[in-house]
Image (cartoon, rainbow, N blue to C red):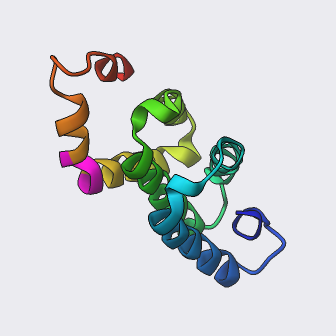
């Protein structure tokens, strides 16, 4: 995550680092400590407004990967963060893309786990 977040490192290396992180998450997420997860969330929020569009897209992919692996309830303030970014013109498109990626890639997961009113009414509070 350090390399992906470091703006002094060339974008191509940061891109590879972000995609490598995605692969590591998919293989070993259950081994991540709470400290690692907290660091991940902090850095993702910091990278959300990156000037480079490819870094922004990879950030969206990492957010989606986290949600797919650990669920929305493990990052309760994520949707509030995303919704608050609609008010910033430079983040508007990024926020739309992030939500789109989440719904495209995790739609059935979210529907199954959160949209059943009997299972969890809390999800609806994000909207």
Left or right? Give the position of 20 relative to 104: right
Residue 109 x, y percent position in the rendering? 23, 45
Main secondary structure along the magenta-highlighted residues = helix
Q: Is residue 107 or residue 33 the one in the foreground?
A: 33
Left or right? Give the position of 127 relative to 77: left
Labels in figure, total: 0
Left or right? Give the position of 118 relative to 72: left
Residue 27 x, y percent position in the rendering? 47, 68
Q: Is residue 107 magenta?
A: yes
Left or right? Give the position of 123 relative to 91: left
* Residue situated furthest front in the rendering: 31
Q: Is residue 79 or residue 34 the one in the foreground?
A: 34
Residue 39 x, y percent position in the rendering? 71, 47
Q: Is residue 47 magenta?
A: no
- At x 55%, y 46%, the residue is 91
- Picture quarter containing residue 71? top left
- At x 69%, y 82%, the residue is 13
- At x 72%, y 43%, the residue is 35
Compared with 14, 84 (above or below) is above
Q: Is residue 115 or residue 34 the one in the foreground?
A: 34
| Stretch in magenta | 104-108
**Which quarter of the figure is the C terminus placed in?**
top left
* Residue situated furthest right in the rendering: 8
**Which quarter of the figure is the N terminus placed in?**
bottom right
Compared with 93, 53 (above or below) is below
- At x 26%, y 16%, the residue is 121
């Amino acid at each position: 995550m350090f390399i992906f977040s470091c703006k002094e490192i060339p974008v191509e290396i940061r891109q590879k680092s972000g995609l490598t992180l995605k692969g590591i998450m998919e293989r070993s997420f259950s081994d991540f400590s709470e400290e690692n997860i907290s660091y991940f969330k902090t850095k993702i929020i910091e990278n959300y407004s990156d000037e480079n569009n490819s870094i922004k897209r990879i950030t969206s992919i990492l957010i989606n990967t986290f949600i797919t692996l650990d669920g929305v309830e493990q990052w309760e303030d994520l949707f509030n963060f995303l919704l608050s970014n609609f008010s910033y013109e430079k983040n508007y498109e990024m926020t739309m893309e992030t939500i789109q990626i989440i719904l495209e890639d995790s739609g059935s997961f979210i529907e199954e786990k959160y949209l059943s009113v009997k299972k969890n009414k809390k999800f609806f509070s994000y909207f």
